[in-house]
Image (cartoon, rainbow, N blue to C red):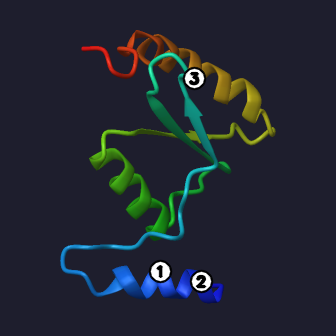
Amino acid sequence: MTKSEEEVYRMWVDLPDTEILTKGWPDFLVRNTRSGKLLCIEVKQPGEKLKPHQQAMKDALESAGIDVLVVESDGRGSYLRILLANLRARRDELLAAQPVGEA
C-alpha cells in the first residue's frame, strides 16, 4: 500500500459499520452503456470455488444490487465459449434495464 493509500485507509478503517474490501474483485466488470447497469464476471478453473475474500466481495456487490456471474471452465480452456453462453443468458436482462436517469 502506498503512503497515500494508507492515509485513506486509516480514515475509514475504524468507522462503525464499515468494511474495507481490497481483495476479491471479479475478473471483469461489464457495463451496459445505455442503461448503466453493471454485471461482474468471475472466471474459475474446473472445480475451483470462490475463495473467502472473493465470496465476501461477491456478497458485497450483490447486496449493492450488482449481479455477479461465476463462470467455470469446462477443463479444456473453453472460457470464451462458456463465458459467451452465460453472457447471452444475461444479455436481455442487461439490455432491458432502464437507461440511467429514467424510471
Q: Place residue 74 in its image quadrant.
A: top right
Residue ID for mark 1: 8
How far apart marks 1 and 2 lie (CA) works out to 6 Å
Q: Residues within 10 Å of mark 1 (few under 14, many from 20)?
A: few
Residue ID for mark 2: 4
Camera-nearest residue between 50 and 65? 65
How far apart marks 1 and 3 lie (CA) works out to 36 Å
Q: Which tag, 2 or 3, sits closer to the chain's start?
A: 2
- Residue type at the position of mark 1: Val
57 vs 25, left or right, is left
Q: Tell me the element at label 1.
A: helix
- Does 26 appear above or below 2? above
> Which numbered disc, 2 or 3, marks the residue closer to the eye?
2
At 31% from the left edge and 39% from the top edge, which residue is drawn? 65
> Which numbered disc, 1 or 3, marks the residue closer to the eye?
1
Say if mark 1 contacts mark 2, CB within 8 Å: yes
63 vs 45, left or right, is left
- Does 17 appear above or below 70? below
Q: Whole-percent x and y of residue 61?
A: 38, 50
- Residue type at the position of mark 3: Leu
Say if mark 2 contacts mark 3, CB within 8 Å: no
The C terminus appears in which quarter of the rendering?
top left
2 vs 101, left or right, is right
- Does 90 appear above or below 17? above
Q: Tell me the element at label 3.
A: helix
Residue ID for mark 3: 87
